[in-house]
Image: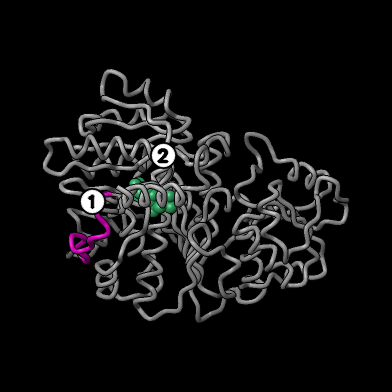
Amino acid sequence: MTPVSTFAGKRVALFGLGGSGLATARALVAGGAEVAAWDDGESSRSKASDVPLVDLSSADWSHFAALVLSPGVPLTHPKPHWTAERAKSAGAEIIGDIELFARERAARAPNAPLVAITGTNGKSTTTALIAHILSEAGREVALGGNIGVPVLDLPPPALERIHVIECSSFQIDLAPSLRASVGLLINLTPDHLDRHGTMENYAAIKERLVAASDTAIVGLDDEYCRAIAARLKGAGRHVVGVSQAASDAADIYVDDHRICVRGSAEWLVDLRIAHALRGAHNGQNAAFAFAAARALGVEVNAISQSLKSFPGLAHRMEPVARRGRVLFVNDSKATNADAAEKALLSFQDIFWILGGKAKEGGIEPLRYLFPRVRKAYLIGAATENFAATLRGSVAFERCGTLDKAVAAAARDAAASEAAEPVVLLSPACASYDQFANFEARGDAFRALVRGL
Ligand code: ADP
């Protein structure tokens, strides 16, 4: 744990007692803050027996120095949460756990290495990959943030330890003083616009992470990131431009499955030996991890070996089982069309399970991949929205729930003539309408497949 000492002796309101909220409350208490923690959910409160609970709706807000908000709670859109309104009226600052960590680092070890990773897609893969490369190179690594362990549950920042932290846009929005040694912005496509209002606002929040980093590693494959890279270069910042395709503008790029560095005559890493990093999108992730590891002084050969030994992450195009000719793939992490596109591009003869809480634009951008889909199995709130897009192009079935969808897709895939039919859970939707999170959805899929 990293005890938060910067609020010692001060009163702090904390709202949202999920995994990271609970860790934050404990870290504040350990550092000597007087915490008043709350959550609307009875079950979340019941898990927080070691944390001082105060009903914030009837509390006196005049003495709170800060409101620490869980990243899942709306700060601005669709409208500010009532705790955010109360904090604003009381003049209390509103921050999150990454901000508390950043302040602790500034106070205790300002030069402690910190790698912060953001982007619309590929964050977790790139974060895990960087951590893997660094640990294989013998460095002490603390991996967490938006992936796995909440940042304040990690050991404290220290010169000999590299923190590798995944940051969501919500966390960056609540972390105004985050300054990483190495900051990564992989890509930007529309996502979470219900929580950020506009694409411009969403992009501006993500830009903050790299704008405040000593070394900014920025993607050049979409117009928002290109503009950000140009702005930072214009401001004289140290920027490393990364592209997933051969490019004169990039410092590091992928050309025909090989990572290349501008100015170097030879390619440096052959990605075809990296079995858990298939697809152009993973080339982008690998190039970013390469750039970050180089910035931290890891040798090229060591990076190359580690890319090869990277085991991959659960819920991201994870092969779950084979039943006869049928392959079952869990891509529950694909919570938007852009991510689902990567999975659809990777297979033929797809029996596609999708649906949940739809994102802006739905699955219309995936229309060009519909010829690969033998049949679609719709679940959750997005059913009618997706049915309207699929109608006339792809056969589909309204399944309602995941268990019915898995049974129907497995049945049809087994009966198909294809050489390798693939039952693919790649929902192109958030999971919140039916599951606690994408992990719960993927675990349910795995269990249902095993049950067949
Ligand atoms: P994040 O943490 O940003 O959500 P993940 O690494 O967990 O990203 O990958 C989630 C899904 O997004 C993957 O299953 C894949 O379909 C897709 N994806 C991964 N990397 C990229 C990328 N660089 N560009 C676009 N899509 C990607």
Nearest-to-viewer mark from 2 and 1: 2
Residue 323 is situated, as x and y percent measured from the top left of the image, at: 21, 49
Of the numbered discs 2 and 1, the one sitting upstream in the chain is 1
Which residue is identified by label 1? 246
Amino acid type of the residue tagged 1 in the rendering = Ala
Question: Which portion, as a residue range, is magenta?
Answer: 268-280
Whether residue 210 is visible here, answered yes or no, is yes
- Residue 243 visible somewhere in the drawing: no
Numbered disc total = 2
Snapshot quadrant of residue 100: bottom right
Identify the image quadrant of the N terminus.
bottom right
Q: Decide if residue 45 is on the left or right side of residue 105.
A: right
Circle 2 packing at 10 Å, graded few (<14), some (14-19), many (20+), is many
Q: Is residue 173 left or right of residue 332?
A: right
Residue type beneath disc 2: Asn
Q: Residues within 10 Å of mark 1 (few under 14, many from 20)?
A: some
Which residue is at 33% across, 27% downward? 397
Q: Determine the residue positioned at 88% across, 51% down.
A: 60
Instruction: Describe the element under mark 1 as helix, strand or loop.
Output: loop
Q: Which mark is residue 289?
A: none
Residue 365: horizontal and vertical position, in percent? 34, 30
- Seen at 42% across and 57% down, the residue is 124
Question: How far apart are the alpha carbons under marks 2 and 1?
Answer: 26 Å
Most foreground residue, 122 or 212: 122
The image quarter containing residue 387 is top left
Residue on which the image places disc 2: 336
Residue 306 vs residue 351, the one in the foreground? 351
Of 364 and 209, nearer the camera is: 364
Residue at image x 35%, y 63%?
289
Examine the structure image and report whether residue 452 is included in the region drawn in magenta: no
Left or right: 94, with 215 as reference point: right
